[in-house]
Image: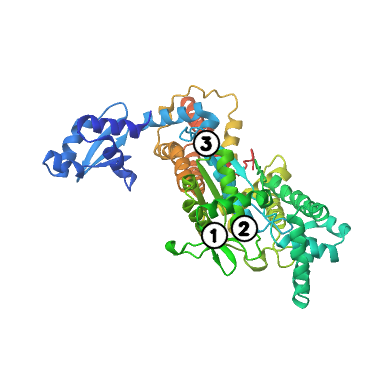
């Protein structure tokens, strides 16, 4: 039973207000002492020709006391509702336990297709911390949308095309050594790429050579294409190692190169619609009416660029998936780029482009030397993940924690700690990485939440044999249980809010609060102690069961694994 809905129905029944007004007006009071829900009676004043406090008093009398409402109380112009706590606990815990892993799910997605594009690293370049931010947010959003019944496709728009590949091929031809590259592919490719820039500064002829190589690549020349494929293959091996560590999977790895033969059509369409104008030899779409710089479609040498490939990709995605939403999880520095391409698509009359959305995120600051790396200046992501796992292992050992498999636990907790940090605040905020807070088992962190889960699991294990399936939950109706179960009941809303705002931190905040309340619950409401009567024990165990399952689902929506003991 949905208590809020029940109250809304009753208010509608006895007032003549429409559903929308009542639904919009019912709110959660700022303080629990003022009840579970409040209805401000101000909209009724004009209809009933009475002052709001008088209306509240009258309604209070007519609405008080039924199976769900303990009492309705007038306070000023507000009508405050107090739920029947025992009933609320019973209904909510039962619903959560019956739903199992479906708890918090809804069918608002109705099978509509949501594309989540994220991670999208660049071939032959390090997978950097910004790509990890994108991966954390995108992976979580993909899971959240799935939970809401959307058909989700995870897309990795690899940066595998562009003039830089001409440079890389040129560098490889001059200084590349396959045996050396094979040992540490991305680092070595990066080295020769950097060397290319140094040398080209002294000898500009190198740039011409690189341009020729890229031209060859565009024309499908066998040798250059093979080299490009080789760079792509060895880069993907490295990227996939990171994705495996993170438990991330993609439905498509179609990168920029995939669209290289799909751009002529875009240029033609834009030309047909008279959207292309010439500017300094380049073909651009003028966006001055929108106060934006022009979007370059063809460079003066006729080469297409990043934006053109993105427009071709959007058109392809529309045709292939007929998406409801096409989400780009890409850093905020690219905001203008996305505004421009969306504007071009809008000018082209593609009304489906309204479903395209840039979901941006802030910068990541690594505090000085704290993030050590074997690679000098560039922070290699794998190093950061491994360092987190290593540090976690040390903490587990120092704490003498009871873990079943220390390798497995260190990995799940260490990686969870990093993911949690990315998803802790509104994504547009910058993040400062700090090992202390990331691995603080008592602060707001993944280990803190994972520990709460493990505690719950340990209680259930120790209670083995106690049959709490049909527990009488009214036996557990304490203040702490009630606050905890109210949070339990708010899960579905948190998932919906997270999707609506494309903000996984709603789930993060939700689960952290749930664990806090859970800790308070099991420390003040003894469960396994001898003097707890059997019926109360059963009721409390049923709560532990529902809450631990919810912690697991919520953490999973953030991409974070749980461990059974810690
Ligand atoms: N590869 C790009 C980068 O590393 C990100 C790609 C973003 N996605 C897109 N459709 N433009 O900056």
Q: Which of marks 1 and 3 is in front?
A: 1
Q: Classify mark 2: helix, strand or loop.
A: helix
Q: Distance between the residues labelled 1 and 3?
A: 27 Å
Looking at mark 2, is its residue's CB closer than 8 Å to ligand 1? yes
Using the image, tell me which numbered label, if any, was put on residue 230: none
Circle 1 Cα neighbour tier, 10 Å, few/some/many (<14 / 14–19 / ≥20) = some
The residue wearing badge 3 is 150
Q: How much space separates mark 1 and mark 2, taking CA atoms?
A: 9 Å
Residue that carries the numbered disc 1 in the rendered image: 337
141 or 32, nearer to the observer? 141
The image quadrant where one finds the N terminus is top left
Nearer to me, 310 or 272: 272
**Whether residue 561 can be seen here:** yes
Q: Residue at x 13, y 44 (%)?
A: 51
Sooner in the amino-acid sequence: mark 3 or mark 2: 3
Q: Which of marks 1 and 3 is nearer the N terminus?
A: 3
Colouring style: rainbow
Q: In which quarter of the image is residue 307?
A: bottom right
> Is mark 1 in CB contact (under 8 Å) with mark 2?
yes
Q: Name the residue under label 2.
A: 306
x, y percent for residue 332: 53, 59
Q: Does the residue labelled 1 lie within 8 Å of ligand 1?
A: yes
Nearest to N terminus: mark 1 or mark 2: 2
Q: In which quarter of the image is ligand 1?
A: bottom right
């Amino acid at each position: 039973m949905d208590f809020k809905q029940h109250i809304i129905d009753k208010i509608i029944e006895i007032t003549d207000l429409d559903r929308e007004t009542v639904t919009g007006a019912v709110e959660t009071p700022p303080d629990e002492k003022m009840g579970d829900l409040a209805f401000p009676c101000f909209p009724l004043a004009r209809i009933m020709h009475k002052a709001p406090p008088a209306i509240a008093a009258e309604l209070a009398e007519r609405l008080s006391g039924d199976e769900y409402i303990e009492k309705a109380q007038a306070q000023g112009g507000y009508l405050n509702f107090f739920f029947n706590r025992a009933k609320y606990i019973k209904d909510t815990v039962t619903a959560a336990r019956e739903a199992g892993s479906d708890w918090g799910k809804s069918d608002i997605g109705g099978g509509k297709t949501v594309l989540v594009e994220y991670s999208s690293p660049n071939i032959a370049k390090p997978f950097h911390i910004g790509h990890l931010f994108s991966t954390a947010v995108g992976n979580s959003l993909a899971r959240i949308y799935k939970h809401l019944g959307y058909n989700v496709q995870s897309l990795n728009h690899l940066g595998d095309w562009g003039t830089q590949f001409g440079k890389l091929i040129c560098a490889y031809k001059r200084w590349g050594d396959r045996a050396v590259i094979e040992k540490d592919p991305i680092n070595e490719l990066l080295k020769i790429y950097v060397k290319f820039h140094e040398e080209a500064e002294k000898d500009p002829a190198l740039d011409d050579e690189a341009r020729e190589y890229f031209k060859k690549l565009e024309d499908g020349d066998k040798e250059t294409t093979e080299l490009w494929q080789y760079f792509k293959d060895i880069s993907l091996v490295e990227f996939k190692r990171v994705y495996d560590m993170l438990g991330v999977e993609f439905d498509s790895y179609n990168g920029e190169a995939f669209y290289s033969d799909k751009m002529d059509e875009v240029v033609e369409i834009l030309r047909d619609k008279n959207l292309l104008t010439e500017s300094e030899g380049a073909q651009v779409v003028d966006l001055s009416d929108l106060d934006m710089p022009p979007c370059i479609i063809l460079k003066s040498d006729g080469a297409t660029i990043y934006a053109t490939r993105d427009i071709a990709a959007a058109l392809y995605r529309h045709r292939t998936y007929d998406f409801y939403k096409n989400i780009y999880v890409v850093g905020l520095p690219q905001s203008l780029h996305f505004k421009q391409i969306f504007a071009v698509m809008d000018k082209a009359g593609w009304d489906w482009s309204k479903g395209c959305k840039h979901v941006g995120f802030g910068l990541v600051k690594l505090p000085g030397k704290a993030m050590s790396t074997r690679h000098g200046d560039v922070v290699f992501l794998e190093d950061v993940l491994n360092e987190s796992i290593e540090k976690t292992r040390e903490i587990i050992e120092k704490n003498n924690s009871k873990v079943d498999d220390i390798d497995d636990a260190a990995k799940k907790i260490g990686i969870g700690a990093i993911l949690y940090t990315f998803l802790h605040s509104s994504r547009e905020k910058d993040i400062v990485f700090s090992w202390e807070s990331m691995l603080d088992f008592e602060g707001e962190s993944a280990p803190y939440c994972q520990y709460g889960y493990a505690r719950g699991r340990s209680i259930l294990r120790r209670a083995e044999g106690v049959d709490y399936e049909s527990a009488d939950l009214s036996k557990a109706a304490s203040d702490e249980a009630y606050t905890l179960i109210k949070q339990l009941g708010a899960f579905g809303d948190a998932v919906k809010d997270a999707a609506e705002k494309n903000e996984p931190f709603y789930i993060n905040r939700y689960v952290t609060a749930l664990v806090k309340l859970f800790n308070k619950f099991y420390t003040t409401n003894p469960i396994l102690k001898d003097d707890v009567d059997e019926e109360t024990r059963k009721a409390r165990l049923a709560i532990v069961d529902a809450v631990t399952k919810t912690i697991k689902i919520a953490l999973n929506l953030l991409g974070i694994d749980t461990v059974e003991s810690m």
